[in-house]
Image (cartoon, rainbow, N blue to C red):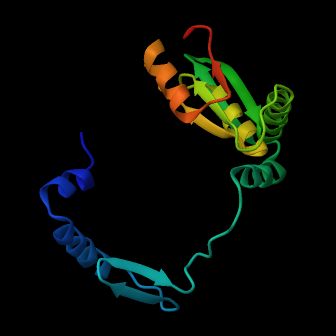
Amino acid sequence: AQPAFSFMRRLLPVRALSLACHREFSTFPRDAGATYLVGGNLAHVVGPKTPELKQDTVWGVFERAASDYGSHDALRVCEGAKIKVHWSYSELQRNAIALANGLHLRGLRKGDRLGVWLPNCSEWLLLQLATAKLGIILVNINPAYRLLEMEYALNLVECRALVMTLTLA
């Protein structure tokens, strides 16, 4: 199914779409401390927003969670009735730091792109956290891609390295 927005965009001229969006915007609940500017085809908010937006990184948020909830369950992966992976926040943090160190030793640095050709698995979460710690850009590649599609995706975004399972190789 196509998203409604792109469907509407094809049917309505841009001006009609922006008017429809403006009417929708005017029905949103208003923040008493904010000034709303509406001009032309644009609408945006200037001033305080509630709740206050925090400037933080994915790794920063995760570190706080690991500090606050270290012994609590962070991840549980089951196969049938058997638990395959069971990590607390502290264990997940340790594993992510170890993986980040490994990526760094392999020459990956902040701003590099790392291709990830994995199905849904616990290793993907570790990679997400490890790349967030190092400032590496994680590039998800659809595991359903064939070799030519994957090669095109890797070249398009200029990945320095690729992580994949042996089952996809």
Q: Quadrant of residue 167?
A: top right
Q: Quadrant of residue 130?
A: top right
Q: In the image shown, does 108 or 3 lie closer to the viewer?
A: 108
Question: Picture coordinates of residue 114 (x, y %)?
Answer: 65, 31
Q: In the image shown, does 92 or 115 lie closer to the viewer?
A: 115
* Side of 165 relative to 61 (left or right): left
Question: Picture coordinates of residue 61 (x, y %)?
Answer: 72, 55
Q: Is residue 96 above or below residue 17?
A: above
Q: Quadrant of residue 8?
A: bottom left
Question: Picture coordinates of residue 131 (x, y %)?
Answer: 72, 39
* Side of 46 relative to 1 (left or right): right
Q: Look at the image and tell me in which quarter the C terminus lies.
A: top right
Q: In the image shown, does 71 or 58 lie closer to the viewer?
A: 58
Q: Residue at x 62, y 76 (%)?
A: 52
Q: Residue at x 17, y 53 (%)?
A: 10
Q: Is residue 143 above or below residue 38?
A: above
